[in-house]
Image (cartoon, grey):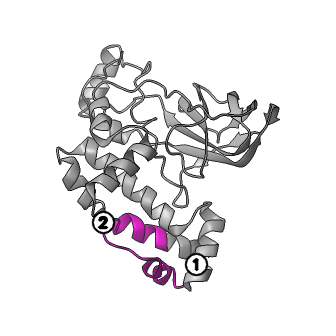
Amino acid sequence: MQIAVERAIEIMWDRYNEPLSLSDMADAAILSRFHFSRVFRSLTGTSPCRFLAAVRLAKAKDILLQSSMNVTDIAYEVGYNSLGTFTSRFTRSVGVSPGRYRQLSATGMPAPLPIVVPGARGVVRGLVALPDTDVPLRVYIGAFDSPIAQGMPVACDVLDSPGPFRLDGVPDGHWYVRAAAVPMRDVDPRPWARKPLFVGAIEPVVGRRGVVDADVELHPVGPLDLPVLVALPELDGSALPVATGEQDDLDREAAGLVPLRRFA
């Protein structure tokens, strides 16, 4: 069944700008609509239509950063028929408007401020585990109200190495903890190229007054993983490493990369 679902997800990435229906996606998986929806949710944590919506917004983020297309054209390019609908969904999912997202690509984005949700608050804490790698990583962890890492988290943490994390002020309720790790060696100066190497999830965590212990194990990004829609990590402007020394300069020139800037 996983191969069938992966086949449908490949169709989403290839034909994101088309009006794909549930029937189209189920046909790609060679399953009935009911069976496809049930299997898809069990493997990805969300519905096919929500996964497709996340793919379209992820594509919009890339186009905003890689082209000079105006926002209206981008909205239609990724399958929306209304600029207003596209703008509101992008802003709600990414955390900033399309125009602001493009603007921040030149300056970097500060860490998000968690949204304030009324009610009792507790702490979710645990350990981040990563596959063996010699690549230095930055890990972003947040608690969200849906399986998709979108919008502003209710609590977040950023680690520069695997180990303990702590999410303070998590309100009562069910929250989805999502984590993404991006490389911090030879950081590509192009924001759209700063993609996670590893992702992980805890679902769901029941927030309550006091402390909830929950570990998160990251794995290499695969086709079943939902796109990360929040503006971080690709717009993270905090303390990005700068190549220094003659050999670093030569290496970067040989690779055709411009020198990295340290964002304020």
Q: Could you classify mark 2 by the number of other residues whose Cα lies within 10 Å: few (under 14), some (14-19), or many (20 or more)?
A: some
- Is residue 63 a member of the stretch shown in magenta? no
- Which of the two residues, 208 or 117, is positioned nearer the viewer here? 117
Image quadrant containing the N terminus: bottom right
Tag 1 and tag 2, C-beta contact below 8 Å: no
Q: Vertical placement of 167 versus 9: above or below? A: above
Q: The residue tagged with tag 1: helix, strand or loop?
A: helix
Q: Is residue 99 left or right of residue 216?
A: left
Q: Secondary structure at mark 2?
A: loop
In-front residue for pair 216/25? 25
Q: Is residue 29 magenta?
A: yes
Q: Position of residue 39 (x, y in %)?
A: 63, 73
Density class for disc 1 (Cα within 10 Å; few <14, some 14-19, many ≥20) is: many
Q: Is residue 141 visible?
A: yes
Judged left or right of residue 156, residue 205 is right
- Residue extending farthest front: 118
Residue 127 sits in which quadrant? top right
Name the kind of residue labelled 2 in the image: Asn
Which of 50 and 178 lies nearest the eye of the viewer?
Answer: 50
- In this figure, which residue is indicated by the disc labeled 1? 36
Residue at figure coordinates x 30%, y 15% from the top left: 246
Q: Residue at x 49, y 42 (%)?
A: 151
Q: Is residue 73 above or below residue 259?
A: below
Distance between mark 1 and mark 2 Cα atoms: 21 Å
Q: Which residues are magenta?
A: 8-30
Q: On the rendered structure, is 221 left or right of 190? A: right
Instruction: Give whichever of 258, 111 is nearer the camera.
Output: 111
What amino acid does circle 1 point to?
Phe
Find disc 2 in the rendering and name its residue: 17
